[in-house]
């Protein structure tokens, strides 16, 4: 008798757990990865990257400036013209599959370093960041030799050339994967800059790419500061810019690119509404609210940072949410029981603390659980602001921390008006028992992604991106592929 295989329809990307004994190897010093080699900056400049949970230095890192950007763009151009764009598409796919598999094999090492350099709980880097990064390489590897079928009615798309990519500190490895995988699958070459506080997993990825024997110059990784990012974006040899970061920097980049013919995509900030209707399953909604705002310390562009709850269930929901928040463990990112790790940097902690004071000063009621914080490192308690006015800064501004602003609504229309009363449009959440209400609300919330009865779910095949001041273009899925090729 044959038995049919059991299908697991839950998205579980952690299909290849690495052995727990894998060693974690962080060098004292990392160079720039240019043309297949690690080199020091031409100026000799370096900066330190620290562990935000201990405030201790992890490594010194070379800091790229204009001359290094020039060298990297030239290497990328040469690799584009001589090898990568000429390679049979199936071979490009093989290289991407190889990167994906190596990432799975070294998953534990990447997860530990991600948590050490950036502060996120190991449970998240182990179960979300690293496996999803590998999944992106697998997904786009599959498209590399099928581009002719990707966009029906069009010729096989052509690559754009050299891509300049700049990423933030909240998902350092995952953002690198989101950027590199589709660009490479289409036949482009890349110069990528990781964020200043979290360069290590991108540099480890450079080692892995070297080990995968990608032709030299196809991927160049240039750690550095904002000036390095600006030099990449504005280099005349760059054909396409992909930026993920704050709306302020994104606007400046859009202005500087306005007079060029470079293609660009911008993934910017957000202030998502998580809407809970009175008919929702309240216990599930509480879990979704917690995941929506406290995942990755709230350093998430699509975080559900505004809770909009139907007035009739406000008191019950908030009481349950407070009970749940009392159980959240804030502390050592490397402890697998930790729910909320370290805030990524001192300036980010100061920014969050500024908003904690401002929210109270402006009249919202601040609530935090009784838990204590570690003595050392940058930590912040999960925080609620209750009874918020629409004018409150904690409702309007992207705080990028574990801070949730709570408001109420009475009617469906009021909920939609409040949800959309923001310059951002990246994501949203709807909690209701009624399917019809899901469809009605998801159509009205003006955001690139709207989750129903769940939150912060990601998949390489689904597009991600914003409306309004949350950005231009999409990453992920076929939409993300389209941003890296020219179509006739
Ligand atoms: P950021 O200050 O805008 O920095 C993002 C990246 O740009 C960093 O690598 C940064 O380098 C670099 N940079 C700074 N100034 C630059 C300039 N003038 N030209 C070119 N590059 C420049 O943002 P962040 O504080 O790192 O990240 C948080 C923001 O990212 C939040 O607003 C969040 O919502 C957004 N985000 C959006 C998405 C999305 O998909 N929509 C995803 C994740 C994060 P340094 O690190 O050296 O400053
Ligand atoms: Mg760091």
Image: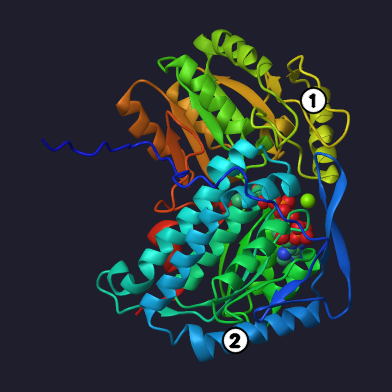
Quadrant where the image shows the N terminus = top left
In this view, 124 is above or below 316: below
Secondary structure at numbered mark 2: helix
* CA gap, disc 2 and disc 1: 53 Å
Identity of the residue drawn at 83% across and 24% down: 361
Q: Which residue is mark 1?
A: 362
Q: Is residue 429 visible?
A: yes
Residue 214's spot in the image, x, y percent? 54, 76
Classify residue 363 as left or right of residue 335. right
Quarter residue 226 falls in: bottom right
Quarter residue 37 falls in: bottom right
Q: Within the displayed image, which quadrant is ligand 1 positioned in?
A: bottom right
Whether the residues at callouts 2 and 1 have beta carbons within 8 Å, the answer is no
Quadrant where the image shows the C terminus = bottom left
Residue 3's spot in the image, x, y percent? 17, 36
Disc on the earlier residue, 2 or 1: 2
In this view, 285 is above or below 54: above
In this view, 133 is above or below 349: below
Q: Is residue 470 visible?
A: no
Q: Which residue is mark 2?
A: 77
């Amino acid at each position: 008798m044959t038995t049919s295989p059991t299908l697991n329809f839950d998205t579980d990307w952690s299909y290849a757990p690495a052995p727990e004994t894998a060693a974690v190897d962080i060098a004292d010093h990392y160079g720039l990865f240019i043309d297949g080699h690690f080199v020091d900056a031409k100026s000799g400049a370096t900066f330190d990257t620290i562990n935000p949970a201990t405030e201790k230095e992890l490594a010194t890192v070379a800091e790229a400036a204009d001359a290094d950007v020039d060298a990297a763009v030239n290497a990328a151009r040469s690799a584009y013209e001589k090898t990568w764009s000429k390679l049979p598409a199936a071979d490009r796919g093989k290289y991407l599959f190889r990167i994906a598999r190596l990432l799975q094999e070294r998953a534990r090492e990447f997860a530990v370093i991600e948590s050490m350099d950036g502060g996120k709980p190991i449970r998240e880097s182990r179960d979300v960041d690293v496996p999803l990064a590998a999944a992106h390489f697998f997904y786009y590897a599959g498209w590399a030799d099928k581009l002719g079928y990707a966009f029906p009615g069009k010729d096989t798309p052509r690559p754009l050339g050299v891509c300049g990519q700049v990423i933030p500190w909240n998902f350092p490895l995952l953002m690198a994967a989101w950027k590199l995988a589709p660009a490479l699958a289409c036949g482009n070459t890349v110069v990528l800059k990781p964020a200043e506080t979290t360069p290590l997993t991108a540099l480890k990825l450079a080692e892995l790419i070297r080990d995968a024997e990608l032709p030299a110059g196809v991927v160049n990784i240039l750690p550095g500061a904002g000036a390095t990012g600006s030099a990449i974006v504005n280099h005349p040899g760059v054909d396409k810019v992909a930026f993920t970061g704050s709306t302020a920097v994104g606007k400046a980049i859009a202005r500087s690119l306005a007079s060029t013919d470079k293609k660009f995509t911008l993934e910017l900030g957000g202030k998502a509404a998580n809407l809970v209707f009175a008919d929702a399953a309240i216990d599930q909604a509480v879990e979704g609210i917690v995941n929506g705002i406290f995942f990755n310390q709230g350093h998430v562009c699509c975080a559900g940072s505004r809770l909009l709850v139907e007035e009739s269930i406000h008191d019950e929901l908030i009481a349950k949410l407070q009970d749940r928040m009392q159980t959240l463990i804030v502390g050592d990112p490397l402890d697998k029981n930790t729910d909320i790790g370290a805030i990524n940097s001192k300036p980010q902690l100061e920014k969050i603390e500024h908003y904690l004071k401002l929210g109270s000063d402006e009249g919202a009621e601040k609530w935090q659980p009784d838990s204590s914080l570690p003595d050392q490192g940058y930590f912040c308690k999960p925080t609620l602001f209750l009874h918020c006015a629409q004018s409150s800064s904690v409702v309007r501004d992207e705080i990028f921390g574990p801070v949730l602003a709570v408001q109420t609504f009475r009617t469906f229309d009021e909920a939609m008006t409040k949800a959309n009363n923001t310059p951002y449009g990246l994501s949203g959440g709807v909690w209701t028992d009624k399917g019809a209400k899901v469809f009605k609300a998801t159509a009205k919330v003006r955001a690139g992604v709207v989750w129903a009865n769940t939150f912060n779910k990601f998949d390489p095949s689904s597009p991600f991106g914003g409306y309004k001041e949350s950005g231009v273009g999409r990453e992920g899925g076929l939409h993300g592929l389209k941003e890296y090729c020219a179509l006739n």
